[in-house]
Image (cartoon, helix red, strand yellow):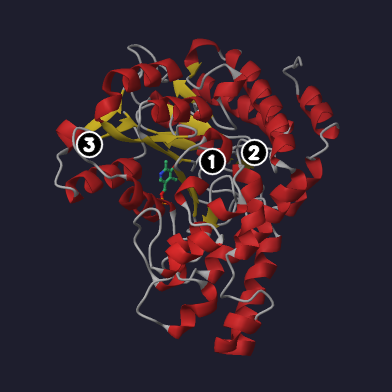
Amino acid sequence: MTYEPTLEHARRRDEADPLRAYRERFALPRDESGKPTLFLCGHSLGLMPLAARQLVMEELDDWARLAVLGHEHARRPWIPYHENLTAGLTHLTGAKTSEVIAMNSLTVNLHLMLASFYRPSGKRTRILIETGAFSSDRHAVTSQLAWHGLDTARHLIELTPPAGTDTIPEEAIEACLEQYGAEIALVLWPGVQFRTGQAFDLERIARAARRAGCVVGFDLAHSIGNMPLALHEYDADFAVWCSYKYLNAGPGAIGGCFVHERHLLGESPANQAVAAAGATQLPHLMGWWGHEETTRFRMESQFRSAPGIAGWQISNPPILAAAPLIASLAIFQEARIERLRAKSVELTGFLEVLIERLGPDARFITPREVSARGCQISVRITGTPGRGRRVFDKLGARGVICDWRDPDVIRVAPVPLYNTFEDVFRFSEQLTQVLREIV
Ligand SMILES: *Cc1c(COP(=O)(O)O)cnc(C)c1O
């Protein structure tokens, strides 16, 4: 597909876009004077689906009307509330129903997964992550090491991009696993790197990690709702994500978690016998909400696990932080992630062509290969120290909402559900003008 760097071309592409009507199902942000802003920040906090308001209102109404009886008699009863989210999550993650659940928030889920899956023993004690991992993930990992009495300097391996580059080729991960695999207990890797926008071949990473005998888990904060996933087939051990980025479920929305079925108790009689004896295949931190639903309220001292990943639940879920996710997942199920991905590839292709025209002032650090990136494009602003930040601030003053990562990166994400080719064109126009003004 070729692109022309004109507004007319952008508009023609929007007219031909079979997904264009979805934009109307989101609240588009405005500035103080009521003018629409140019929003390209769905990688950080996605826009509100208009249907979210009604779903939240229904829960408030049911609470007002029914009080405690809402647990069983709300129009969506609160006790099995997580079931409203399962089909949407299986679509987006490529998991089986028993393998995914909405619960807690991302970093909390990461700790719960590490409690189950990071089990250092003998020589196999180390954790592999990337240099420049999201701060919260690194804090989770280093605090887990400390919890086990292990020091970070010796037990954390941080893999750095090859000299002079910003991204980490999968070969480098494979080479690291070949060299140190026997000492590595667990690999934690992002699906899409938050700063560079690099999308990783998760199947390949999972294969290499498992070949080396390591447990492998993925942080999908920047992947879910962005690119199609097939977690079950990748054979990952676990994955975690949040729902407020590409999933558009609102600030602090309920997160999610995947555990491969080989670690789960099924509903077979044999597994039920194991469950009845209070055991699960893997030790995990427990709470009453992971207890089998039919007997949970007997409040017995013996823990009897719910089947599948439902047994990993701890607390009753935050209904008001889960309701918007129902609205959002319904949109994804209707639009289909494969179609969204196809449009996303076109949007970022257009953005790439436009940014190339800016010359050496703006350097693309996201990989050029389409398979190695999702919606997000990260651009390094070159020039005198501080220029990038001034460019970013000026864009903000002109109503462009994107974001900044120190020391010199602007991140933008045209999101196929609600962004247009015209948005992409207008962004490049704004950036061109600002780069001329700030030299
Ligand atoms: C957004 C993000 C988080 C945020 O964690 P919360 O627990 O939801 O606050 C953590 N890790 C990564 C990689 C992220 O992108």
Point out the image quarter for the C terminus. top left
Disc number placed over residue 125 in the picture, else none: 3
Say which quarter of the image contains residue 67.
bottom right
- Residue 213, percent from left and from top: 35, 31
Q: Residues within 10 Å of mark 2 (few under 14, many from 20)?
A: many
As helix, strand or loop, the secondary structure at mark 2 comes to: loop
For marks 2 and 1, the one nearer the N-term is 1
Residue 276 visible, this orientation: yes
Disc number placed over residue 212 in the picture, else none: none
Q: Residues within 10 Å of mark 3 (few under 14, many from 20)?
A: many
Q: Nearer the viewer, residue 72 or 290?
A: 290
The amino acid sitting under disc 2 is Val
Disc number placed over residue 415 in the picture, else none: 2
The amino acid sitting under disc 1 is His
Point out the image quarter for the N terminus. top right
Q: Nearer the viewer, residue 21 or 256?
A: 256
Residue 80 vertical placement versus 267 (above, below): below
Q: Residues within 10 Å of mark 1 (few under 14, many from 20)?
A: many
Kindly identify the residue that appears in the image at 45 percent across and 32 percent down.
193
Kindly identify the residue that appears in the image at 50 percent across and 66 percent down.
306
Disc number placed over residue 43 in the picture, else none: 1
Mark 2 CB in 8 Å range of ligand 1?
no
Say which quarter of the image contains residue 357.
top right
Say which quarter of the image contains residue 53.
bottom right
Q: How many marks?
A: 3
